[in-house]
Image (cartoon, rainbow, N blue to C red):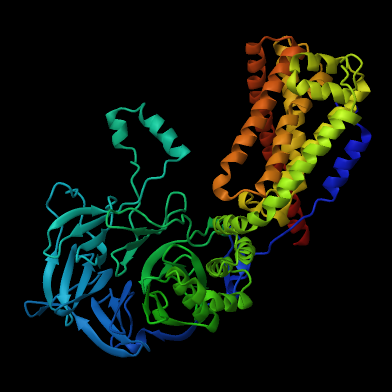
Amino acid sequence: MTRFIPKTVIAVLVIMLLLTPVFQVAAASVDEGYGYNSYDESVPAPAGYQDDLTVYGQVSPEGSFGMAQDMATYDGELYVLNSKIGIITVLNADLEYQRSIRFTRDGEELSVVGANGMFLDKTDDGLQILLADTENQRVLRADATGRVMQVYQKPTEELFPQKQEFRPTKVLVGSDKTVYVICQGVYKGAVTFSADGEFLGFYGSNDIDITAAMLLEHFWKSLMNQEQLGRVQQNVSIEFTNFAADSRGFIYTCTRVTDNSMGEIKRLNAKGINLLPVDNYGDLEDAWIKSEHQDTAFVDIVSINDNLVAALDTQRGRVFLYSNDGMLLMIFGGSGQFQGTFRTPSALECIGDSIYVLDPYKDSITRFAPTSYGTALLTASSLYQDGRYAESLDLWKQVIRQNGNFETAYVGIGRALMGQEDYAGAMDYFKKGQDRTGYSQAYKEYRKTSAQFLVAPMLIAIVVLLVVYGLYARYLRGPKREVSLTTASVARRCSHTLLHPTDGFTALMNAPRRGISVLCGILITCLFGVAILHRQATAFVFNENKLEELDIRMIFAITVIVFFAFVLSNRLVCTLFNGNGAVREIICVCAVSLIPMMLAMVLKIAISHFLSLDEGGLLTALMVIGIMWSVLLLLAGMRQIHEYDTKQAVLSVIFTVIGMMLMAFIGLLVYGLYNQIAAFFGAIIDEISYIGMT
């Protein structure tokens, strides 16, 4: 097939492949602080919080925090739940021991060993403590001294599964005084009670994600009898790990593990509907340690001043700080034995600007305080969330001076400049912050202010062009002459084919072979070039590609290689269906048929620079027209060269695509087999080398 393509074209393609730039982005070292950009890649960042104090269980009279699983704060004090002996240890903001609280009922001490969660409720009567007494299957409400006033037990209503044990792990009181309880093995959501102890139902369960494996499992279940179904595990939603509430009535939940590692954090309204626009939380890059996937596992979450949310990852000991709309602000902490790192942290809380992390396996509590960078970032974020963009401008600039990788700072500056009607400056910062919606809004305003200066020049230019064209048509062009396709050039025949495919393809097939080869080579090269141009030159608003990571080899694969794969598959298919088209003719038909699609791509590139985001439907319509035009040309060409009717031409294209899929599948199998063989012989060589060294 290559003999139909000029050698110069092949040389150009080879040179472009050899000159392919290779860009690599090194992941930021987590020890130095890091964040994520809009492409979910880790980037370096200054430390937003630093540990300034760590205490161990020896500060309490009991000599240990007793594998504490939860903490809570009230009036500047930190309450630590000692699960091992069933008491609460109270520390001040400097982690100095204040007192211990033991639970009593009717004047006798009550054992709450194994309790896993608590909540401090501020009432008109003062502080009240709600305790999730897991092992004793109850929730206790006590006063500030530990005197139990109320007990919430397993609901007797049929709505609650009666065969299920009532093992509460976490408890929360909402702004409306509804009591929310997370129970082990209960997947319908949090169990809710009224303040008087009446069972109200369930709240906000996690959704079940429909996957291909689940659909396949559903198919097999449809073939089973009742006895077999009873032995099969059912698909249920995943229970929450922990939750927190803000003063506005929203409840934030975190989940340790989800089906697709998405939706680990949610912000639920009164109806249990998630309001966060972001789906992915925690570390966004995959990490493996000894062949084990290290996915983020959130065990605690806390709302800070209604503007921030802190979530604790027990897998790698990290604290993730988000704005209340899911925007990642900073990450700190880590796994290790040194101060400021953790083994398996279980809870976090906040007093003022300080964040406290509890690690039961190190029997320690660590306090983190914001750095100057963290203080500027938190203040700027708070102003930004309140819509006070102008006031946050200087702070965002301070953040950028210390962390040029923080894209949200650029967006914040863009919002401030929008308020100052500096639309050109706003567009520049929105582009740096990868905010296409903000860029589009700024561009629309910029276009309004610029249009009034461009209307007159554009009208004058149009009038001049019309006059020049009229003079040319009248005095210079001369009379229009008819050109016969049998004597026309290959280019003339090609242009005629776009609107008259039947006689056009007939004329092309009768053209000199050398001319056809040159035409096909030029069109295939144009396909490759237009694909690169489409990726790199489409306007920012409609282009989500990372321009500095251009991989010409990949574009070559999805254009030139796919093109010839289609040609090969069509030739094989049409051989089975009595098609008469030769390889040269198939190449010609496919190459010419791509012209409308390439023209649509070029027009899209040009027009995209003059449209806003909500006007993108025009580009979609343009591409649809170009693709449909190319498909119609392809079908007409297949009819012509293979001597098919319309139905046979359509079937030949469908089976050609199926053939390409089979070729790709076989290629993947061969590639996998090659890797296994290479790994096998590599292991043998390593073993022989090891034996030789010993």
- Does the rendering let one see residue 49? no
Name the residue located 40 percent from the left edge and 80 percent from the top edge.
364
| Left-right relation of 37 to 138 | right
Counting from the top left corner in percent of width and height, residue 638 is at 72, 17
Name the residue located 66 percent from the left edge and 46 percent from the top edge.
608
Is 285 in front, or is 605? 605
Is 605 in front, or is 188? 605
Kindly indicate the quadrant of the structure image that contains residue 153.
bottom left
617 versus 300 height, above or below: above
Is 140 in front, or is 639? 639
49 versus 581 height, above or below: below
Quarter of the rendering occupied by the N terminus: top right
Counting from the top left corner in percent of width and height, residue 646 is at 65, 12
Counting from the top left corner in percent of width and height, residue 556 is at 77, 40
94 versus 620 height, above or below: below
Counting from the top left corner in percent of width and height, residue 130 is at 21, 71
79 versus 169 height, above or below: below
| Left-right relation of 184 to 212 | left
